[in-house]
Amino acid sequence: MPAVSSDDPLEAAAAEIARAGPPGSVAAFLLVGEIVLCRFYGGDAELYRRHGPKHVSLRRLAALLGEGGIDASALSRAVKAHLVLRGVEVVRASRHLTPSHLRVALPLPPADCLRLLRRAEAGRWSTRQLSAVVSRHRQGKTVGCDRNDSGLIV
């Protein structure tokens, strides 16, 4: 990658993301989300929620990362994953979960997302297995799942 102009925050973020390595692991994927959140939203989750990914051109950032980098949708998912999972070491340190597992679980409410990701890690679920459980959850079915007193899958 050519020298980065400190005047362009998108170029600086692209360089930092490139140094973080390919987002093939959960830890690297979450680091990408953290970089975007910190560089463009000052680490403020509420600012990100208010302005969303259009506050910054994630498409332009993805273009700067180039072929084989990470696309704009994945950048947005990385920020959401970072927000939901920051401080959750069992998921961050996972040797089994992949960014695809996160993509499947992230549409759920945060508590359900965490619960199912923990179960997926403990049970070494494939992305397909997790997707089936998430689908049942979204349809309100409890096949293969238990619900707690508040109706959430456990």
Image (spheres, grey):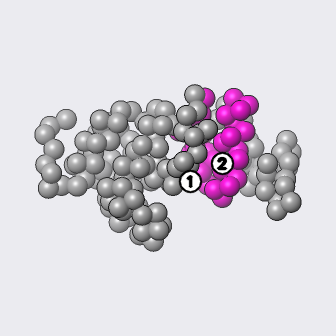
Residue 115 within the magenta-colored segment of the rendering: yes
Q: Is residue 69 visible?
A: yes
The three-letter amino acid code for the residue at tag 1 is Val
- How many dots with numbers? 2
Q: Earlier in the sequence, mark 2 or mark 1?
A: 1
The three-letter amino acid code for the residue at tag 2 is Leu
Where residue 1 appears, as percent x and y from the top left, is 19, 35
Quadrant of res 44: bottom left
Residue 26 within the magenta-colored segment of the rendering: no
* CB-based contact (under 8 Å), mark 2 and mark 1: yes
User: What residue lies at 86% left-to-right and 60% top-to-bottom?
Assistant: 149
User: In the drawing, what numbered circle is on residue 84?
Assistant: 1
- The secondary element bearing badge 2 is classed as helix
**126 with respect to 6 (left or right):** right
**What whole-number distance in Å separates the C-alpha atoms at marks 2 and 1?**
8 Å
- The secondary element bearing badge 1 is classed as helix
Where residue 11 appears, as percent x and y from the top left, is 22, 49
Which residue is the extreme one toward the bottom? 50
- Main SS type for the magenta part? helix
User: What residue lies at 36% left-to-right and 49% top-to-bottom?
Assistant: 35
Quadrant of res 14: top left
The residue stretch that appears in magenta: 96-125
User: What residue lies at 71% left-to-right and 32% top-to-bottom?
Assistant: 122
User: In the drawing, what numbered circle is on residue 114?
Assistant: 2
